[in-house]
Amino acid sequence: MQSQRLRAILKAVFFFECYQEYSKAIELNDFDNYERDLVLVWEQDSDDEILTDDFDLWVKSNPLLELESIKQSRISGLKIERQKNINSGSSEFVVKSMNRFVLNSATDESFTTAQLIEQAKVNELPPNVIESVYVGLDLSKTGDNTAISTLYVQPDGHYYVDSSTFVPTYQQEHDILKKSEHDDIDYLQAEKLGRATIATGNGIIDEDEVISWLVNHIQKLQEKYTVIFLYDS
């Protein structure tokens, strides 16, 4: 359960960063870096459209409304969901049905915030509090990074997260500076801190190097903890 929650938040953060990046490209009408990307985003253009009586606008976030056979029943369902959320003060309808990002402070509905994550940072694990460890692997070779994340779980359900990444440069002409600019991450600094390994040569991630790093990492962890390995297939 804890590993699923971790994967969910990491994917959400990554997706929102990509969303911001693509939005900027649309605003500037500059797609030179995205010729190989297919981006499909169904969302309302503004929060005002959520309260509209022009329900045809909702096709922006609900493309199935293009189908006349289900349009009216679907709109009726959405109107009921909207009223329930208005009555409760929830943002669930805005997020799940209108596909709008809700960036607010921590509430009962939000898993966490950037501020809380920043406050939760530690330089080292406290001794004798870890019950089990999960290691997750998400492989890539030429475009996306390969990520290895480690989740340290306490008996009370609290956990600590650590991560390392292998960075390809194949799609950025073997230029790590272009990759850093594209991802808005200082990979050279991350490498100095031991958080990243930058691909050399042809710029493709060496899977043997990844597996060697992973095995060594898990073996060190097994000296202290019970380790569960997960991977994204």
Image: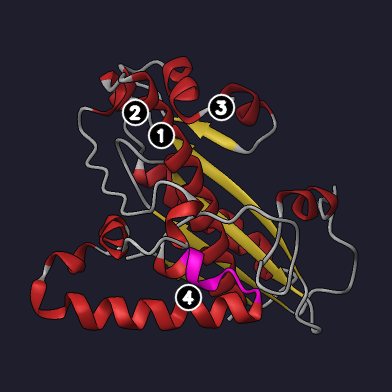
Query: Contact (CB < 8 A) between labels 3 and 2?
Result: no
Q: Secondary structure at mark 1?
A: helix
How many marks do you count on the picture? 4
Please tell me which residue lies in front, 87 or 128. Answer: 87
Q: Quadrant of the C terminus?
A: bottom left
Q: Do the residues under discs 2 and 1 have CB atoms within 8 angstroms? A: yes
Q: Please say whether residue 91 is one of the residues in the magenta stretch.
A: yes
Calculate the distance from the C-alpha at mark 3 to the C-alpha at mark 1. Answer: 23 Å
Q: Which residues are magenta?
A: 89-95
Tell me the element at label 2: helix
Q: Is residue 159 above or below residue 99?
A: below
State the CA–CA distance, disc 4 to disc 2: 30 Å
Q: Residue at x 59, y 66 (%)?
A: 6
Q: Vertical placement of 126 versus 25: above or below?
A: below
Q: Please, what is the three-letter code of the amino acid marked with disc 3?
A: Tyr
Q: Which residue is denoted by mark 3 in the rendering?
A: 187
Q: Amino acid at mark 4?
A: Arg
Inspect the image, locate mark 2, and give the three-letter code of the amino acid beneath it. Ile
Closer to the chain start, of discs 3 and 1, is 1
Residue visible at 46% across and 48% down?
46
- Amino acid on which the number 1 mark rests in the picture: Ser
Q: Secondary structure at mark 4?
A: helix
Nearer the observer: mark 4 or 3; the answer is 4
- Near mark 3 (Cα within 10 A), the count class, few <14, some 14-19 or many ≥20, is many
- The residue lying toward the viewer, choosing from 191 and 75, is 75
Residue 193 spot, x, y in % from top left = 70, 32
Residue position for label 2: 26
Residue indicated by mark 4: 82
Residue 26 location, quadrant = top left
